[in-house]
Amino acid sequence: MAAEGGQTPTSYIQHHLKNLTVSVQEGSLWTLHVDTFLTAVFMGLIGVFAMWVATRRATAGVPGRWQAFVEIVLEFIDKQAKDAYHGASKLVTPIAITLFVWILLMNALKFIPADFISVPMAKLAVFVAELAGAADPMKYNYWKPVPTADVHATLGLSISVFFLMIFFALRAKGLGGFIKELFVAPFGPWLFPANLLLNAVELLSKPVSLAMRLFGNMFGGEIVFLLIWVLASAGVFGVIASGAFGLGWMLFHMLVIPLQAFIFMMLSVVYLSLMEEHH
């Protein structure tokens, strides 16, 4: 809780919002957010394993509960992707499934109280740092539990979508057609500087908006959860208030968490579809 280790509510929240980072060199731009990276990979592997279990036990007869649930989710995503995408690529549905399931699993970590993950993992990080002979092991006493509450993770996802957008555009229009549209559309060849500027802003704003929307919702929700959590340090009434508000906020996030994964997935599919359209 907030009182552990002599922490104030402010220092408690600041501690839980800081990532465990490892830099090639102090002050270097090349800094790895270890907690975000490892947690994202771990949740991705869980998603792969869950899908593997469903296909491993798949039957043409009466499906089991897990197979039925997975089939419902996949059919829903497939329908939404086909409704939003007007091209002929067979890659869109797998991309949509990957984005939705992975983001949903990462978002779902918000349902677990922060201390239940960050405290033991931070202690493990300190232990590993001591074994590695770090000069200051306590420097690594951090672990941010929700990857999508880290803008580096959401930007990584959106940049991947951006490269897919370019790939889809090049495949549909060719390199020459894609470059020509950058200079010619929408105002014609005589206003090519304005066309290029407008198209560049449009292209770059799509991945940025994807990343910021997901990050903003998850980071804001994380702060509110932490504020509710520190109420428990204010005595019996604080514990009661923390439990009540925490339950209400968690019930609200039962909608927010899948909704944010769905929005990211749908916007990505729409952007891929738009990149194949000729202007």
Image: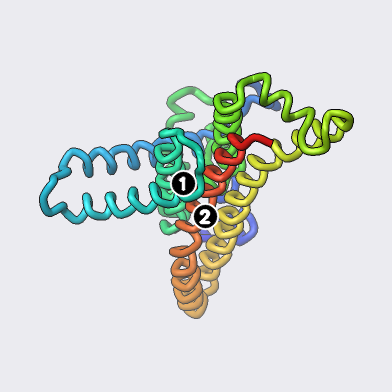
The x, y position of residue 250, in whole percent, is 46, 66
Q: Amino acid at mark 2?
A: Gln
Residue drawn at (57%, 42%) of the image: 154
The residue shown at (58%, 34%) is 276
Real-space CA distance between mark 1 and mark 2, rounded to the nearest whole angstrom: 8 Å
Total marks shown come to 2
- Residue 23: x, y in percent? 61, 26
- SS for dot 2: helix
The residue indicated by pointer 2 is 260
Q: Which mark is residue 103?
A: 1
Q: Amino acid at mark 1?
A: Ile
- Residue at image position (56%, 48%) is 267
Kindly tell me whether residue 22 is visible in this rendering. Answer: no
Q: Residue furthest right?
A: 190
The type of colouring in the image is: rainbow
Q: Residue 274, labelled with which disc?
A: none
- Is 145 left or right of 214, judged from the image as shown? left
Tag 1 and tag 2, C-beta contact below 8 Å: yes
